[in-house]
Amino acid sequence: DIVMTQSPSSLAVSAGETVTINCKSSQSLLSSRNQINYLAWYQQKPGQSPKLLIYLASTRESGVPDRFIGSGSGTDFTLTISSVQAEDLADYYCQQHYNYPLTFGSGTKLEIK
Amino acid sequence: EVQLVESGGGLVQPGSSLKVSCVASGFTFSRYVMEWFRQAPENGIEWLAYINTDSSSTHYAETVKGRFTISRDNAKNIVDMQLSSLRSEDTAMYFCARESFFKYGSYGFDYWGQGVMVTVSS
C-alpha cells in the first residue's frame, strides 16, 4: 500500500498569512505513461463531508479560490493557501489515486488565530 | 444539482449486520464509478470499497474484505454497502462518493454524501 505522510498535523495562523501543507508518498505518484501525478487535496470543514480542492496535484476544482495552490511531483507535494481567510478553518487531506487501495494522509488541522 | 444522500446507519451490536445506502440524483448515475469511505470520530478518512459502472468489478480495503459488500442498482440510482460481522472499530461516519474520470484516469472524488453514522457497541 502507498503510505501518505502529511505534515504538519496542525497549524494556527492569522488571517492574511500564507500556509504550506506537505504530503509525501511512499512511492511515486507520477505515471510514466502520461507524466500525470495522481494526487488530490480535500478540504473538510467541521461537520461536513470532504470537498475536492485540487486534483492531478495542481489543478483547482471548479469554484475553488485561486489562493489554493497545489504543487509537487513524484513523491513530494504541497498545498499552499495564500492569504488565509477565516472560512478556511478546516482539516486538509492529501489522497493518492495512483492505485488501490486508495490512501489518505492523516490530515492537517488549520486553525485561525 | 448533484446529490448523494446516505441512509441506513444506526446503533448495532458487535457481530451484527447493517446495510447503508446512497441514493444519487442530478447526474447519469450509470456512467460513474462509486465508492465508500469512512471516518472514525476525530480520525482521518479511510477508503473502503469501489464498484465500477456495471458492477463487473469491485475492490475492497483489507480491513473490510470478506465482511463488507458493495453493490449498485443503476435503475434506482442506488449504491449500497452491506456491513457484516461488525466490530467496535467499524464505528464511523460512512460516506459515499462519486469518482470522476478523464482521458488518463481518475482525477478524484468530486461529490460526496453528507455521511451516515454507524455505531457498533453492546
Image (cartoon, coloured by chain):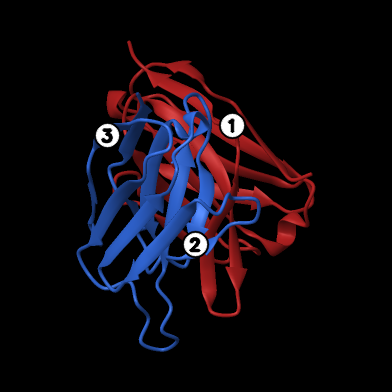
Chain colours: A blue, B red
Could one spot residue A13 in this view of the protein?
A: yes
Q: Residue at x 34, y 77 (%)?
A: A30
Answer with mark 2 or mark 3, whichever residue precedes in sequence: 3
Q: Secondary structure at mark 1?
A: loop
**Residue hosting label 3:** A11
Tag 3 subunit: A
Looking at numbered disc 2 in the image, what kind of residue is underneath it?
Answer: Tyr
Q: Residue at x 52, y 68 (%)?
A: B106
Q: Quadrant of residue A75?
A: bottom left
Tag 2 subunit: A
Q: Residue at x 23, y 38 (%)?
A: A9
Q: Secondary structure at mark 2?
A: strand
CB of mark 2 within 8 Å of CB of mark 3? no
Depth-wise, is mark 2 or mark 3 nearer the camera?
3
Q: Which mark is residue A55?
A: 2
In this view, the residue in front, B70 or A52, is A52
